[in-house]
Structures are given as structure tokens and as C-alpha cells.
Image (tube, rainbow, N blue to C red):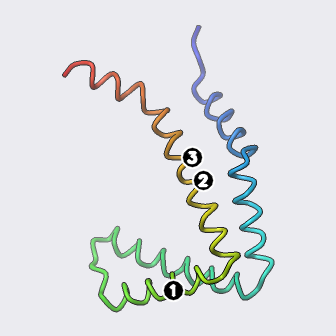
Amino acid sequence: MAVNIYDAAYDLEKAIRQSDEYARLQNMYQAVYADEGARKMFEGFRDLQLKLQEKQMMGQEITQQEMDEAQKTVGLVQQNLKIAQLMEAEQQMSRVIAELNQVIMKPLEELYSSHQ
């Protein structure tokens, strides 16, 4: 019996949306965006993060000044309880996605490791 992997992928998407981890992430995100000060701080942090990632992807070097600014910004946002909780929820969701990726990639890993 053939399996439509896209149907399975959409089922997985639905399961993720219904997971406790996603619900917690969504709640923490809403809490940050309901607080104007936290929202502005978080958006500034995200902008800086994206700017540095973009530089890295383009092969540009990140300066020590930019690194210092990033570390200072991380320190500030982590002092905000709502943002800290959101970041923790993001990390938890990232771990779940990484674990799911391992499961998804297992057939390929087994295939390629079987001929060594």
C-alpha cells in the first residue's frame, strides 16, 4: 500500500499545532506582544539577530562591536520575564522539531549506513 508522504506531513503539522509545546509558545508570544515594552525590546532583539544572521549568510565577518551589542541585548531581553519565557518556549519547540527531524531522516541514515 502506497503512502502519501504529503498527507503524513500535513498530519504532522496538525499534531504540532495541537501540541502542548506549540500552545505554550503561542501563549508566551501573545504575552510578549500584549506588553508594549516587552514587544519593542523583543522586536529590537529579533532585528539584531536577523541582521547578524544575514551578515553570516553573506560571508561577512561580524565585528567585535556587533558581538558586544548582541551580548548586551541578550542580557537585557533575558531580564524581562515574558521574553525569557518566550525564548525558553522557542528553545523547547526547536528541540521538538530537531527530534522530529531525526525521526524523519532515519530511513535515509539507515540506507546510507547499511553499505559501509
Q: Nearer the viewer, residue 79 or 49?
A: 79
Report x, y in % for residue 50: 48, 74
Q: x, y (%) of residue 66?
A: 37, 87
Q: On residue 89, which mark appears? A: none
The residue singled out by tag 3 in the image is 96
Q: Secondary structure at mark 3?
A: helix
Residue pictured at 51% horizontal, 41% vertical:
99
Q: What whole-number distance in Å separates the C-alpha atoms at marks 3 and 2? A: 5 Å
Quarter of the figure with the N terminus: top right
The residue wearing badge 1 is 73
Q: Residue at x 35, y 29 (%)?
A: 109
* Mark 3 → mark 1, Cα distance in angstroms: 26 Å
Badge 2 density bin: few <14, some 14–19, many ≥20, Cα 10 Å: many
Q: Is residue 112 left or right of residue 116?
A: right
Residue 96: x, y in percent?
A: 57, 46
Pick the residue in front: 3 or 108: 108
Q: Amino acid at mark 1?
A: Thr
Would you say the residues marked 3 and 2 are in contact, meaning their CB atoms lie under 8 Å apart?
yes
Tell whether 115 sits left or right of 96: left
* SS at mark 1 in the image: helix
